[in-house]
Image (cartoon, rainbow, N blue to C red):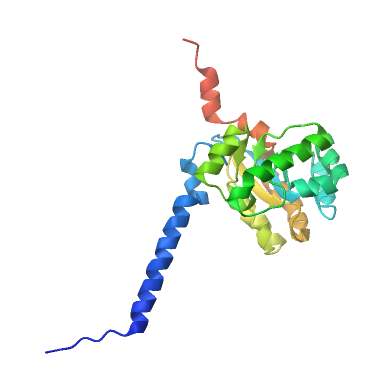
């Protein structure tokens, strides 16, 4: 007769592995990862078009160290972008807020303090809306949650608040500070018509983003791309175009 003796360590490792799998499954169900966004019709991250148009978006500003330089580059290139601002930064930098608006760029809501706690998102969204209105007498249409974290309830609440939950389809990964060349390649190699590009003008050191921005713009222009705001990009959506062309019953 053979006796099988199981060591406690392998069993413990197996239990830990199963716990990790269960935890990953819970997160996948609760928080929609970027690839799953294509299944969520309430999320704006792409426009279906054959036109070579794309939208530059900047998160985490306005920042007195970097936003002004980014605005200078955009002005030189005659390009309009969308800035997802933090309420606390908007309150501290009213002149930059006015410059963003006066130079024809679009302003989106990125929360107040960049908290990653989902149950704070809506309260921070509302606080930032109030700050923007007090500063510019303007309402925001687009909201981007910190980290791109969304839940089904957040999508529902943002929509109920009259805003469009907006993410991205091309990640520059400038938040990793991988070097200007890598930031440029992350955009240029992954670009496609109707895409929304994620960049940052605040939050941390953004010298690399600034160094990469001109190259990104020029290389995409060489490919025939034009840069528009999120609102202008929406006008190129093939679904909207088809609906507009449907004759009345």
Which residue is found at the position 77% from the left and 55% from the top? 210
Which residue is found at the position 71% from the left and 49% from the top? 59
Q: Position of residue 18 (x, y in %)?
A: 37, 68
Q: State which quadrant residue 133 falls in.
A: top right
Q: Position of residue 134 (x, y in %)?
A: 81, 36
Q: Residue furthest right?
A: 95
Residue nearest the observer in this picture, 66 or 235: 66
Residue nearest the observer in this picture, 94 or 211: 94
Q: State which quadrant residue 159 falls in.
A: top right
Which residue is found at the position 18% from the left and 88% from the top? 3
Q: Position of residue 175 (x, y in %)?
A: 67, 59
Which residue is found at the position 57% from the left and 46% from the top? 169
Q: Is residue 59 above or below residue 238?
A: below
User: Taking 50 as reference, is 2 left or right?
Assistant: left
Q: Is residue 90 above or below residue 13?
A: above
Residue nearest the observer in this picture, 8 or 208: 8
Residue 103 in view (yes/no):
no
User: Taking 227 as reference, is 190 left or right?
Assistant: left
Q: Residue furthest top?
A: 249
Q: Is residue 241 above or below residue 155?
A: above
Q: Is residue 244 above or below residue 213?
A: above
Q: Position of residue 23 (x, y in %)?
A: 44, 62
């Amino acid at each position: 007769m053979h006796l099988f003796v199981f060591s406690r360590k392998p069993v413990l490792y197996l239990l830990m592995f199963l716990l990790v799998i269960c935890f990953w499954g819970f997160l996948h169900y609760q928080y929609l990862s970027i690839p799953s966004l294509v299944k969520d019709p309430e999320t704006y991250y792409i426009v279906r078009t054959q036109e070579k148009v794309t939208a530059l978006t900047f998160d985490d500003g306005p920042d007195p160290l970097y936003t002004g330089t980014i605005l200078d580059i955009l002005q030189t290139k005659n390009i309009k972008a969308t800035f997802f601002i933090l309420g606390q930064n908007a309150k501290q930098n009213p002149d930059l807020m006015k410059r963003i608006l006066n130079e024809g760029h679009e302003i989106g809501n990125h929360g107040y303090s960049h908290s990653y706690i989902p149950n704070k998102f809506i309260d921070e969204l509302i606080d930032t809306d109030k700050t923007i209105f007090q500063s510019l007498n303007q309402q925001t249409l687009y909201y981007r949650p910190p980290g791109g974290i969304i839940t089904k309830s957040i999508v529902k609440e943002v929509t109920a608040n009259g805003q469009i939950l907006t993410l991205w389809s091309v990640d520059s990964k400038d938040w990793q500070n991988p070097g200007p060349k890598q930031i440029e390649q992350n955009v240029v190699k992954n670009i496609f018509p109707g895409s929304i590009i994620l960049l940052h003008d605040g939050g941390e050191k953004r010298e690399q983003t600034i160094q990469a921005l001109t190259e990104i713009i020029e290389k995409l222009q060489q490919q025939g791309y034009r840069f528009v705001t999120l609102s202008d990009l929406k006008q190129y959506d093939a679904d909207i175009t088809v609906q507009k062309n449907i004759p009345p019953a």
